[in-house]
Amino acid sequence: MSAGDEAHYRFPPAAAYGLNRCLYLVKSDDAYRGRFAADPRAAAAELGLGDAEVAALLAGDRDALVGLGAHPYLVFMADLRLRMARGAGSMEYF
């Protein structure tokens, strides 16, 4: 890359592993998703997430999550899976 060019995609930092693991589990693991939906703080504590990570998860703040190192795909898919589990609206045209 030449000077001034920025990469479009940045790999999540290793420090964000727990956050990305949480989002992956919400997306992929029915049991964890159920625990997260019932008590997000307790589910986040299982993975040792910090206060800033928990606050961003509770707020559903995509920008804050990505700023903390979450992979944008996982943020999107975890939110989608939670919405589907809640039966919030129709996914017919998604």
Image: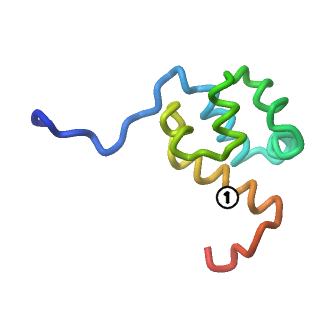
Residue under the image location 61 percent in, 73 percent down? 94
Instruction: Residue 31: name its quadrant.
Output: top right
**Amino acid type, callout 1:** Leu
Instruction: Residue 84: name its quadrant.
Output: bottom right
Residue at label 1?
Answer: 80
Residue 71, how many percent across, how many down? 51, 40
Residue most extreme to the left: 2
Q: How is the image coloured?
A: rainbow
In-image side of 89 versus 67 (left or right) = right
Residue under the image location 60 percent in, 45 percent down? 61
In depth, the one of 24 and 83 nearer the eye is 83
In this rendering, is residue 87 above or below 72?
Answer: below
Residue 80, how many percent across, how many down? 67, 58
In-image side of 28 versus 75 (left or right) = right
In-image side of 52 versus 44 (left or right) = left
In this rendering, is residue 30 above or below 90?
Answer: above
Within 10 Å of disc 1 (Cα), the crowding (few <14, some 14-19, many 20+) is some
Q: Quadrant of the N terminus?
A: top left
Residue most extreme to the bottom: 93
Residue under the image location 67 percent in, 22 percent down? 50
SS type, badge 1:
helix
Residue under the image location 63 percent in, 27 percent down? 52
Residue 83, how many percent across, how many down? 74, 60
In-image side of 16 versus 13 (left or right) = right
In this rendering, is residue 74 above or below 55?
Answer: below
In this rendering, is residue 81 above or below 58?
Answer: below
Residue 3, how many percent across, how many down? 11, 33
